[in-house]
Image: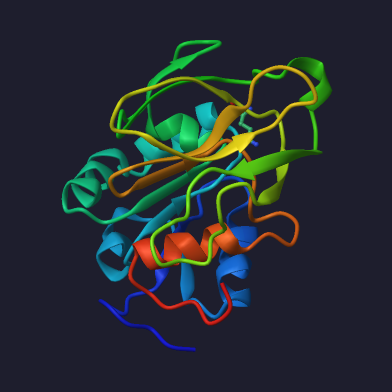
Amino acid sequence: MSATGDGRPIGVLGLQGDFEAHRRAFEEIGVPARVVRFAGELAAISGLVIPGGESTTLIKLMLDVGFIEPLRLFHAEGRPLFGTCAGAILLAAKVTNPDQFSLGLIDIDIERNAYGRQVESFETARGRVEEPLDSSPFGLPGDSMDLVLIRAPRIRRYGPQVRVLVRHVPASGDPEPVLVRQGNVLAGTFHPELGPERRIHGYFARMARLDAVAA
Ligand code: GLN
């Protein structure tokens, strides 16, 4: 295991949802990661994952523990954020179905629970990698990727600064963005921590300037 750059571990917000699966996913690729629950712990981490779960509950808990303003500051300092599912909802510019508070740290509009009944629970779908990502072995354009969708949101609009890294390829209809990046903010509507997929965790570790041994 090696850690370069600032050498601090990745943090995974542990207020609600499947944070432990994210921490294990980093551990599996040799990236130090720790669960954080208090704003005071942000100084000790290089980047923060906001996991999937239930976004309304997550916001309430973040407000309760005073995490919102410190998180804005963390972002303003240029440190990377990765929101998955409920975490992506939290980072979006605008949330619908229903409307709710969000941080507006990535220029996307996102609709909650947007697949209807068929994706009420765990479902695997096919994704397509859209660009070769920096120096990371994230994947080459056209590579496929299994996507785990759980009561997943859909990205309904993205701004010109937003790069689409992975699209969902539905059985019919147009491919839709499911992993997007703007600056140091990464947002995905699926759950890369569930199942064997680890390329995205390796990619985020690189955003946070850590070396993953087997990304
Ligand atoms: N449906 C949840 C929400 O709207 C997100 C689901 C998830 O994170 N898997 O907050």
Q: Is residue 64 above or below residue 114?
A: below
Q: Is residue 76 left or right of residue 146?
A: left
Give how far across and how far down residue 82 sits, in percent.
43, 49
What colouring method underlies this structural image?
rainbow
Q: Is residue 94 left or right of residue 192?
A: left
Residue at 58 percent of width and 23 percent of height: 154
Give how far across and how far down residue 24 sits, in percent.
62, 69
- Camera-nearest residue between 168 and 32: 168
Q: Is residue 89 above or below residue 195?
A: above
Image quadrant in which you'd find residue 163: top left
Residue at 23 percent of width and 40 percent of height: 69
Residue at 52 percent of width and 26 percent of height: 56
Image quadrant in which you'd find residue 92: top left
Q: Is residue 105 above or below residue 209?
A: above
Give how far across and how far down residue 88 sits, in percent.
48, 36
- Camera-nearest residue between 34 and 211: 211
Give how far across and how far down residue 209 sits, in percent.
33, 71
- Camera-nearest residue between 181 and 19: 181
Q: Is residue 92 left or right of residue 137?
A: left
Ligand 1: which quarter? top right
Q: Quadrant of the C terminus?
A: bottom right
Residue at 24 percent of width and 65 percent of height: 43
- Camera-nearest residue between 207 and 173: 173
